[in-house]
Image (cartoon, rainbow, N blue to C red):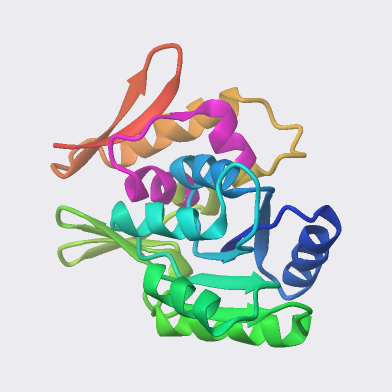
Amino acid sequence: MFRILVVEDDNELRNLFIKVLSKNEYKPIGASDGDEAMKIIDGDYIDLIISDLMMPKMDGYELIKKLRETGSAIPVLIITAKDGFRDMQQGFLTGADDYMVKPVNVNEMVLRVGALLRRAQIISERKQTIGGLTLEYDSMTVYCGNAREVLPQKEFLLLYKLVSYPNRIFTRRQLMDDIWGIDSETEDRTVDVHINRLRDRFRDNSDFEIATVRGLGYKAVRK
């Protein structure tokens, strides 16, 4: 399920976009401004961003600029009330991938989201590679040389998230919220059980290891 970050300071509009995206089988995450969005991006895997321009703390232009300065290629769809050519020009020059003017047709928004994901080849090539190991998201399969192994869903998602951000520390709660869901009643120690299973599976792997950061959580480390 693709994760879409909706950055919009208008609560009603943000909730509408989130509702529409959910109905179209995306997993939306809301943020009220660019500053909050950057914090989410730093700790989460995001496939695409929908962003307003006029927001407090950090506006859309600054958000996109910071993303591109860090080398991020996450597709960005701007949805804004700023309808002038210069505003649109600045958006694209800053690094946006598409631009819509409010009020928007939410069905058109969904079409544009799909087009951006296809253009970025995220749909057909959702893979992560670390050393000689390749994780194929859509089939939950891990490839290493000529060997392949289909992992249980939760184990795969946990490994995929860690490998997507080498050396980044994730707390147990972050991993629980992302993989089991915020409303899950499953205990945090379930993460430990799955981490131990992954360590057993890949104990002879020479590409990476899952390190424990005492008092914080876990991270994937390249060997």
Q: Position of residue 176 (x, y in %)?
A: 60, 36
In this rendering, position of residue 7 left or right of residue 13 = left
Which residue in the rendered view is the most extreme toward the top? 215
The reply to whether the magenta stretch includes residue 116 is: no
Q: Quadrant of residue 49?
A: bottom right
Q: Name above or below for residue 3 compared with residue 155.
A: below
Q: Where is residue 184 in the image (x, y as percent from the top left)?
A: 74, 38
Please tell me whether the stretch drawn in magenta is mainly helix, strand or loop.
helix
Quarter of the image for the C terminus: give it: top left
In this rendering, position of residue 83 left or right of residue 193 = right
Q: Name above or below for residue 26 compared with residue 204.
A: below
Q: Name above or below for residue 31 compared with residue 104.
A: above
Which residue is at the front of the view, 11 or 155?
11
Which residue is at the front of the view, 145 or 112?
112
Q: Quadrant of residue 178?
A: top right
In this rendering, position of residue 126 left or right of residue 69 = right
In this rendering, position of residue 78 left or right of residue 126 = right
Q: Which residue is drawn at 78% across and 85% down?
A: 105
Magenta stretch in the rendered image: 157-177
Q: Where is residue 89 in the image (x, y as percent from the top left)?
A: 46, 79
Which residue is at the front of the view, 140 or 124?
124
Q: Which residue is drawn at 38% across and 39% down?
A: 198
Q: In which quarter of the image is residue 128?
A: bottom left
The reply to whether the magenta stretch includes residue 172 is: yes
Q: Residue at x 83, y 65 (%)?
A: 16
Q: Where is residue 2 in the image (x, y as percent from the top left)?
A: 57, 66
Which residue is at the front of the view, 205 or 161?
161
